Amino acid sequence: MDEQRLVNSLINAFKKHGFEILRAVGGNYQEPYKIGRHEPDIIARDPESGLIIIGEAKTAEGLSSAYTKEQLLDFARRVMAEGLSRGKRVPLHIIVPKTELGKVNDLLTELGLKQEIGQNIILWYEE
């Protein structure tokens, strides 16, 4: 499955949930800025609270890279520095092909992030 298709699916899901897309890979969006050492695929915002939301798409190949591990560690524990949501954790949404749900769960366990699922890390999948 193509990564841009996953990004587009997550953008559509964010829009359905009322989030404003600030930056994203592809489409008519500006490229995302770095968060930590890496640029995510999507940076969105909850218009009511001002909370920033990070979206990251991963294919089967991408899940096994050292780069992905660095990204997830950079993105998973961000905290809002200002605004109405100051001090709140920045949610990380990860979308993968459905066949890779086990692999992403294993990776999050390996990185010590498994306990974050459902609290700060939200998993999505594409059929």
Image (cartoon, rainbow, N blue to C red):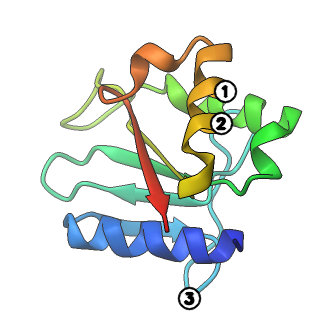
- Give the mark nearer the N terminus: 2 vs 3: 3
Closer to the eye: label 2 or 3: 2
Comparing 63 with 56, the one in front is: 63
The answer to whether the residue labelled 2 contacts the one labelled 3, judged by CB atoms less than 8 Å apart, is: no
Comparing 119 with 126, the one in front is: 126
For disc 3, the marked residue is 28
The quarter of the displayed image where residue 20 is located: bottom left
The answer to whether the residue labelled 1 contacts the one labelled 3, judged by CB atoms less than 8 Å apart, is: no
Give left or right: position of 6 versus 34.
Answer: left
Q: Residue at x 58, y 36 (%)?
A: 102
For disc 1, the marked residue is 107
For disc 2, the marked residue is 103
The residue positioned farthest toward the bottom in the image shown: 28
Q: CA distance from mark 1 to mark 3?
A: 32 Å
Q: Badge 2: how crowded within 10 Å, few (<14), some, or many (20+)?
A: some
Closer to the eye: label 1 or 2: 2
